[in-house]
Image: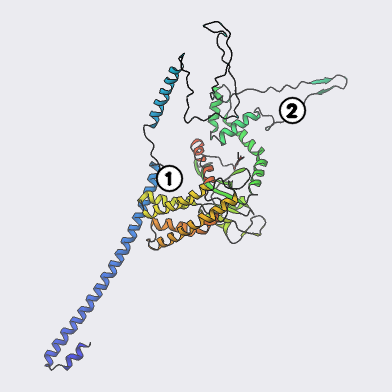
Amino acid sequence: MNLLAELDQLNLEPAAKTQVAAMLQALVEQAAQDAQTIANQQQLLQTKDASLQAKEVKIAALTHELAYYKRIRFSTQSEALAPLQRDVFEETWSTDISAIDAEVEQLQDEPCDTVARPKRLRAGRQPLPSHLPRIEHRHEPESCTCGKCGNNLVEIGEDVTEQLDVEPARFFVHRHIRPQYACRRCETVTAAPIPPAVIDGGMAAVGLLRWVMISKFLDHLPLYRLEQIAARDGVTLSRSTLADWVGRLGVALQPLSDRLAWHLLQRDCLHADETPVPQLDPGSGKTKKAYLWAYRSNDLQPGPKILVFDYQAGRSGRHAQQFLGDWQGHLVVDDYAGYKALFAAARAHPEHQHLIKPCVELACWTHARRKFFDLFQASQSPIAHEALQRIAVVYAIEAEGQGLSTAERQRLRVEKSLPLLSALHDWLQQTRLHTAPNSATAKAIDYSLKRWAALTRYAETGDLPIDNNPIENSIRPIALGKKNWLCVTRRRIREIAFKIAA
């Protein structure tokens, strides 16, 4: 509506008409200014709302991160959803019960003419391993005649008890005597050849070398502690000598290392992971971060279990490519970017300069579950709780199929796991639509959705693992070693553990 045009139709005096027109123009300009002010205020409110939402997301993320590190630093690191709390008095009760049992045994040992002492059941005590050698000690009565009537006693049975004992490291010396025989006529000397040794001219026998290597790499004892253990028996073993033995044994065992690695790469499914170790940086007085790359065979497939540690100075993905070479198969890994090149459409072999087929990625359900567990521990999120409950059902199916054959396990997964995983995928997608972006909940959901194909690939077969727990359990003892030997030298080593399934 044009107010000025309607004003011209009114029968007003020119002065009044001019005055009214000026008033109308002022009102229109004021309305335009008010509208602009309102638009500016709305824009400012939108900006503040977006800033407030971003700050809320940031606060939630920091709260989640703080709760995670507080749990790791001060609380239990178990990822059980509802762990049972151990009673603080349980240790004291166990001690008191053991003392009472000992007193009862002493009372039962007293002679009784009417009631035979019943055999006491020892709850929780397992029989001693049958493969351990037995040293028999026979305890005969002081007299073989009856103390009442004087007749000869007749053996009617035996009361056998067993105690477990251990013999600490015992040092002894092998003396190799090689008589020298001479022929007077030929003027020659004959003697038996020198027995072969791992270290030529060394004083260490095979048993001592085995003790040093097992103590260092399996029991994670640094060499200075082995030096102290030997000193208690009056044996002098300097650290420099022990270090020399370890280095020479590493060279001597390298063919075995290469052979075991070759056998490992014949498998078509492997676990892979890496863990940092502090490496001494000569000249700087400091340490830098090196890595132990671990590769392990799949427990669900037949054959002995093989575990290989490859020591490298960095975490670059090229180390995994160099170790695996042209290997092809299913590789179980976490979401570390260093493995992504292995799953590319095609990759070039670093030595032969030709393209090879990619590996097939298997994602780890433990890592996916951990995202929701950390979220639940930090905020008691109902979404995280629901995800944990659904994943727990998937793991329950895996526990049900532990003792089955490959074909039976595959049938079980197809019938039960695949429908549950499909329902979980639909639920995650619907939940993600109603979740604020960049929040901890969105990140936990996105981690699973982005790797869904790799997470569910196992359920289509009967011999692929659901997670990467076997390799994580294998590298967990290295943390104990890092607390003992603090750092490693710059010299590159490869440690290989070979375990045959029982």
Q: How far across and down, in percent of the image, does residue 261 sit?
A: 64, 45
Residue 63 image label: none
Residue denoted by label 2:
194
Q: Quarter holding the N terminus?
A: bottom left
Residue lying furthest right in this view?
A: 185
Q: Is residue 436 above or below residue 129?
A: below
Please say which color scheme the image uses.
rainbow
Name the residue nearer the viewer: 372 or 230: 372
- Mark 2 crowd level (few <14, some 14–19, many ≥20, 10 Å Cα): few
- Mark yes or no: residue 290 visible: no
Q: How far across and down, in percent of the image, does residue 79 sit?
A: 43, 45
- Element under label 1? loop
Q: Residue at x 34, y 55 (%)?
A: 59
Q: Is residue 418 above or below residue 106?
A: below
- Element under label 2? loop
Residue 50 picture quarter: bottom left
Q: How far across and down, in percent of the image, does residue 343 sit?
A: 57, 58
Name the residue nearer the viewer: 39 or 313: 39
Residue denoted by label 1:
80
Residue type at the position of mark 2: Ile
Q: Is residue 274 above or below residue 136?
A: below
Q: Residue at x 66, y 41 (%)?
A: 256
Q: Residue at x 87, y 22 (%)?
A: 186
Residue type at the position of mark 1: Ala
